[in-house]
């Protein structure tokens, strides 16, 4: 009988993810981060009749106000081959309905094309943006450079030539604190909200080697940083920022190119810019490739007659939408 079984072994889970193309935020550590900040993380292996694992999903469960009970969410997953996808999604819907009493299970697969079985619907609302840029790191550096905007190549060369600037990986809590100071300055200048510092400490500690942070330094002080999550195949941009001097030196160009080259050195095959939203940061990202990637998006499987209430909350206004999204993202 094919059925889900909870995985309680971190090494077993991560080994499966790393060996089967799992996204960085399907790793055990990402679930631990979310578990420390209001979610429950459940790691589920789908086993066949011979107890062989044929798919997996890290399900994040968030309790919602009565009478909605909870939602279940699978970011950049599940991890399953096309041949077993329908079976996994059907079993997943039944499992979370009766185990977590969720009003809905939402998935945001790490795929451009994605077919879902009957009962699943494409959602207009998303947590992670579907539109992004994904670089093919199997291409050589010359090919990657040739695919960039001319101005991007110029700024990479110019910023990399700054003799006062050094780029390296961040090591330890003290250096991370300096990067977070830069992040606070960036957020204040750009007007976007941040998590608590503890959230970022948890990302750094719980993802460990799967969450490298790179920074550009002048006089041993970071002026820009770029924070990734990585699996065996994929690098995924989490956070980044610059202070005023970083802006003047256009440090983000040399820094991002350094990170891309480092990921190639580590033999990763994909570099995901983490989504395209409105504003100057998207203009900056678009200069790195002539091609954009539109992932399949968000799919919902309604599990309760209350799903209509849940789905109607989202478009009721910016404040309500922002509040519900903040609940989901926390």
Image: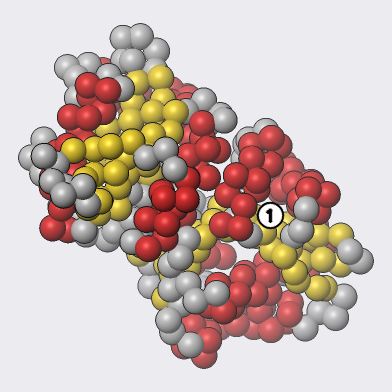
The answer, for residue 126, to whether it is visible in the render is no
| Residue at 73 percent of width and 80 percent of height | 160
* Residue 315 percent location from the top left of the image: 33, 28
| Residue at 67 percent of width and 59 percent of height | 213
> Pointer 1: residues within 10 angstroms few (<14), some, or many (20+)?
many
* Residue 56 percent location from the top left of the image: 30, 47
Please name whichever residue, 66 or 280, is drawn nearer the observer in this view of the structure. Answer: 66
Residue that sits furthest to the front in the current view:
50
Residue that sits furthest to the bottom in the current view:
142
Image quarter of residue 266: bottom right
* Residue 238 percent location from the top left of the image: 56, 52
Q: Which residue is mark 1?
A: 241
| Residue at 51 percent of width and 31 percent of height | 35
Q: Is residue 113 left or right of residue 276?
A: left
Callout 1: helix, strand or loop?
A: strand
Please name whichever residue, 46 or 329, is drawn nearer the observer in this view of the structure. Answer: 46
Please name whichever residue, 263 or 195, is drawn nearer the observer in this view of the structure. Answer: 263
Residue 168 in the image: above or below residue 149: above
Image quarter of residue 292: bottom left
The answer, for residue 195, to whether it is visible in the render is yes
Residue 124 in the image: above or below residue 171: above
């Amino acid at each position: 009988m094919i059925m889900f079984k909870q995985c309680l072994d971190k090494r077993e889970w991560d080994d499966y993810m790393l060996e089967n193309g799992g996204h960085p935020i399907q790793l055990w550590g990402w679930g631990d981060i979310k578990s420390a900040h209001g979610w429950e993380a459940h790691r589920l292996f789908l086993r066949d009749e011979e107890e062989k694992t044929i798919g997996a999903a890290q399900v994040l469960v968030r309790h919602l106000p009565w009478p909605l009970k909870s939602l279940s969410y699978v970011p950049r997953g599940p991890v399953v081959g096309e041949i077993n996808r329908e079976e996994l999604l059907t079993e997943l819907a039944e499992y979370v309905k009766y185990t977590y009493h969720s009003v809905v299970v939402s998935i945001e697969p790490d795929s451009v094309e994605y077919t879902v079985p009957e009962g699943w619907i494409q959602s207009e609302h998303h947590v992670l943006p579907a539109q992004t840029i994904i670089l093919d790191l199997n291409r050589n550096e010359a090919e990657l450079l040739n695919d960039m905007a001319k101005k991007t190549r110029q700024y990479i060369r110019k910023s990399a030539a700054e003799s006062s600037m050094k780029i390296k990986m961040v090591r330890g809590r003290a250096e991370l604190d300096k990067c977070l100071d830069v992040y606070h300055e960036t957020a204040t200048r750009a007007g976007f909200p941040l998590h608590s510092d503890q959230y970022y400490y948890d990302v750094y500690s719980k993802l460990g080697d799967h969450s490298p942070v790179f920074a550009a330094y002048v006089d041993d002080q970071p002026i820009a940083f770029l924070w990734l999550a990585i699996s065996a195949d994929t690098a995924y941009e989490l956070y980044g920022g610059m202070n005023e001097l970083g802006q003047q030196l256009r440090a983000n160009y040399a820094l991002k190119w350094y990170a891309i080259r480092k990921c190639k050195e580590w033999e990763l095959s994909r570099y995901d810019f983490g989504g395209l939203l409105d504003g100057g940061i998207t203009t900056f990202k678009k200069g790195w490739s002539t091609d954009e990637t539109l992932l399949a998006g968000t799919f919902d499987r309604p599990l309760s007659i209350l799903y209509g209430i849940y789905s109607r909350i989202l478009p009721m206004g910016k404040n309500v939408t922002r509040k519900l999204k903040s609940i989901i993202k926390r």
